[in-house]
Each structure stands twice: as C-alpha cells, then as structure tokens.
Amino acid sequence: MADPNAILCQGTTMTFDGNAVGGLMSISGIGSGSATEIDITTLSSVAKEYVSGLRDFGSVSIELRRNQDDVGQASMFTAMASQLTKVVVITLPTSALNVATFSGFVQSLSTDMQADAAVTGTAVIRITGVVVWS
C-alpha cells in the first residue's frame, strides 16, 4: 500500500536570485553538512569531553538539463563568475513545511555532453548560513 503521507518530488521548483531555474532533474544534499566539535577537555576530565560547535549546512547538488537560454541557469552562471552569494528557494509541491530558503554561492556549474543524449550539467551551491523550512 502506498504511503499517503509520502512527499512526491514531481512539481518541485527552484529559484536562484528570484529567477526560476528550468531543467531540474534532481536536487540533493539540502542541509547535508554537520556541526563542528569543540574539545572542552580539562586536566580534571576522566575522558575527552566535547560540545557541539556551529552547524555547517553543506552544499546542494543540482542536476540539470542544461539550457544556455534559461534565465535561472544564466543567473547561476553569472553569480558564479562574479563570486556572488544569492538567495535560493526550493519549493516542494506538497507537505506542511515545503519551502527551503537559504543563501549560497555557486561553486561549480558544469555542462556535460555525450552522443545520443541531451546536454546536462551539475551545479553545486555552497550554503552559507541556515536553511529555513517554512
């Protein structure tokens, strides 16, 4: 029996600096980073002691069907070339908290070609700050 609470991916959208990004094939890694650990061990400790440091929200990898004329993809390419941090909004089609908003900069944006296939590519956006789900 199908899970009636499953969140389906079809219909997921993404904007980069307010521009819709077309050709989305997959998005992975939202919030994939981890917190650092801070050593608080003292001479009176009987074992190593740690507390959690700042959380790193990691990077998001986006597989695309590349289109040089797509405004969103062009915006990502321009931001990468200019080393600018922009707002990214990813919206799932369903669920109560379905919008992920964060700031990030484009680390890479590839264009990949092979025989008998569509032109594709992968964008990697480094998250800076917190991912907010609303």
Image (cartoon, helix red, strand yellow):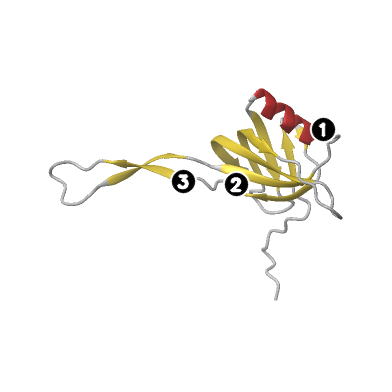
Considering only order in the chain, which callout, 3 or 1, is on the residue closer to the N terminus?
3
Q: Amino acid at mark 2?
A: Ile
* Residue position for label 1: 71
Query: How crowded is the residue under tag 1: few (<14 C-alpha within 10 Å), some, or many (20+)?
Result: some
The amino acid pointed to by label 3 is Ser
Q: Toward the viewer: 105 or 116?
A: 116
Q: Residue at x 20, y 51 (%)?
A: 47
Residue at 48% across / 40% down in the picture?
A: 56
**Mark 2, residue position:** 30
Q: Amino acid at mark 1?
A: Val
- Left/right placement of residue 101 relative to residue 19 reads left
Q: Position of residue 107 (x, y in %)?
A: 62, 35
x, y (%) of residue 96? 65, 51
Density class for disc 2 (Cα within 10 Å; few <14, some 14-19, many ≥20) is: some
Name the residue at 73% across, 41% down.
14
Label 2 vs 1, first from the N-terminus: 2
Give the distance between the C-alpha atoms of the residues marked 2 and 1, in whole angstroms.
Answer: 23 Å
Label pair 2/1, CB-CB below 8 angstroms: no
**Which disc is residue 93 wearing?**
none
Residue reaching furthest to the front: 115
Instruction: Please provide percent x and percent y for residue 7.
Output: 69, 58
Q: CA distance from mark 2 to mark 3?
A: 12 Å
User: Mark 3 sits on what residue?
Assistant: 34
Q: CA distance from mark 1 to mark 3?
A: 32 Å
Residue 45 at x, y = what percent?
16, 47
> Which image quadrant: the N terminus?
bottom right
Q: Secondary structure at mark 3?
A: loop
Rendered view: 1 above or below 99: below
Furthest residue toward bottom: 1
Say which quadrant the C terminus sits in: top right
